[in-house]
Image: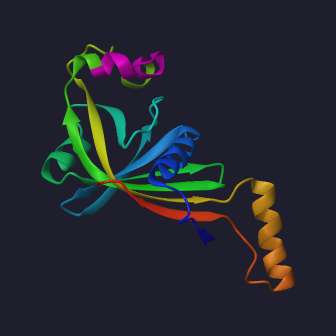
Amino acid sequence: MSEDTELTREEHVAKVRQLIKESDIALLTTVTPDGLETRPMMTQEVEFDGDLWFFTLRETAKVTEIKENPAVNVGYVHKNKSFVSVRGLAEVVEDPEQKEALWNKAYAAIFDVEAQDESLILLKVLVQSVEYWDAGSIVKSAFNIARKLLLDNPETELGTNATVELDV
C-alpha cells in the first residue's frame, strides 16, 4: 500500500466520506473495565463532516462505557476492498430534532420504537483521526497481489493508505 500524502485535508475527508458511505455496518469499539468491547452499529445515511452519528437504546452497556471512558474506535469494511478505522471521543446526545433528522424506517424495525421514544438516544463520535486503506476493485486487488507474488515484485501497488488527523 502506498501512503497518500498528496491530498489536502478536505480531499481526505471526501475520500473517507465515500468509503464510509459504501459500508452499511460499522463496528464500534468501546473501553470496558475488562478491556475492549466491539459491536455492530448501523451506518447513518448522512454526509461525513468529521462527526459520526449512531442510534442506540439508553439502557445499554455501550452507553455506560462511553460515559465512563469516551475513547472509541469505529471500523468500516466494504466488500474487502476498503477499510476505515476512526479514532475519536463519543458522547451521548439527547436531541429530539437531531433524532428526527437522522431517523428512517429501518430503525423502527431494529429498535422496536419510534424516533420520539425517550429510550432511544444518539451517540455522536467526534472524530480525532482516520486511517483508511483503499485497494480499489477486488479484481484489481487480486491481480496486483498475484502479480506481486508471481513476479516477486515488491514495487507492485496494492492500494492507498492514509492517516488524517481531524482534531485541529
Quadrant location of the N terminus?
Answer: bottom right
State the image quarter where residue 24 is shown.
top right
Q: Is residue 37 magenta?
A: no
Residue 86, can we see it? yes
> Which residue sits at x=46%, y=15%?
105
- Judge whether 36 appears above or below 20 on screen: below
| Direction from residue 90 to residue 11 in the image, left or right | right
**Quarter location, residue 153:** bottom right
For the point 42% across and 25% down, the residue is: 110
Callout count: 0
Q: Is 100 situated above or below 66? A: above
- Queried whether the magenta region covers residue 99, the answer comes back as yes
Magenta stretch, main secondary structure class: helix
Q: Nearer the viewer, residue 157 or 42?
A: 157
Compared across the picture, whether 88 is left or right of 39 comes to left
Quarter the C terminus occupies: bottom left
Q: Residue furthest left?
A: 68
Q: Residue at x 56, y 46 (%)?
A: 19
In this image, 149 relative to 25: left or right? right
Q: Nearer the viewer, residue 41 or 126?
A: 126
Colouring method of the image: rainbow
Across and down, in percent, residue 12 comes to 50, 52
Residue 112 visible (yes or no): no
Residue situated in front as seen by the camera: 68 or 152: 152
| Image coordinates for residue 10, horizontal then vertical, percent | 47, 48
- Relative to 162, 32 lies left or right: left
The magenta span reads 98-108
| Quarter holding residue 158 | bottom right
Residue located 67% across and 59% down the image = 135
